[in-house]
Image (tube, grey):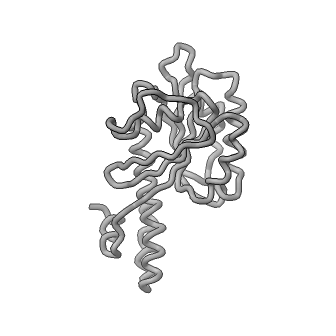
Amino acid sequence: MGLLDKLSGWLGLRKKEVNVLCLGLDNSGKTTIINQLKPSNTQAQEIVPTIGFNIEKFKSSSLSFTVFDMSGQSRYRNLWEHYYKESHAIIFVIDSGDKLRMVVAKEELDTLLKHEDIRSKKMPVLFFANKMDLRDAMSSVRVSQMLSLENIKDKPWHICASDAIKGEGLQEGLDWLQGKCVCSVNLIQLLYCAKTKGNVQIAHRILVHC
């Protein structure tokens, strides 16, 4: 058991719930990815385009995820910002075979990162360079370059090549996101709980571990 978990237990913190926004252009594979991350007995057999947004819930070993699967169609992208404030993490999905719309994906990402409700948070951002099975798919390195991900300095981020249909690359991404979210959620809860119990100095001692 790590230091964060020990302190969480000492302070009476057990359940960890994380709100995740799943964003990206339409037809990038967002819904298919989220469907693959759900338990097999709850997975949908047929994937249809998302209208507005869908809410999905699933659990990992240490977290309960509530995922807001937002439509990537242009007429619905204005809905994204209404969910920024309550989110703890972002999954941004890119169709690595769609070179023509990579510029649009970058514009949407830049707008997202500049929004006050996102800019003010050190939330983890997981990128899936999806559809890696396509013959003309770009590598995750190339996608990272085209999106200028190296310019993201104020948030932890990670990019994985993925094939949503086969589920390849998804566990790597989820493991990374889970690790970052556990740390972030523990810190928020610990700082709040320790403050109410008059032990702020204890919570601050763990900041160096994240």
Q: Can you give x and y, in whole percent of width and height, for residue 67 in the image?
A: 49, 47
Residue that appears at 40% across and 39% down = 37
Answer left or right for 184 relative to 141.
left
Q: Quadrant of the N terminus?
A: bottom left
Count of marks overlaid on the render: 0
Q: Can you give x and y, in whole percent of width and height, for residue 178 in the image?
A: 41, 50
Q: Quadrant of the C terminus?
A: bottom left
Q: Can you give x and y, in whole percent of width and height, for residue 203 in the image?
A: 43, 74
Outermost residue toward the bottom? 198
> In this orientation, which residue lies closer to the viewer: 34 or 115?
34
Residue that appears at 63% across and 47% down = 152
Position above or below: 114 against 85:
above
Position above or below: 46 against 12:
above
Residue that appears at 39% across and 54% down = 64
Outermost residue toward the top? 135
> In this orientation, which residue lies closer to the viewer: 78 or 11?
78
Q: Can you give x and y, in whole percent of width and height, for residue 11 in the image?
A: 35, 75
Position above or below: 39 against 98:
below
Residue that appears at 30% across and 68% down = 6
Answer left or right for 58 relative to 32.
left
Answer left or right for 193 relative to 51.
left
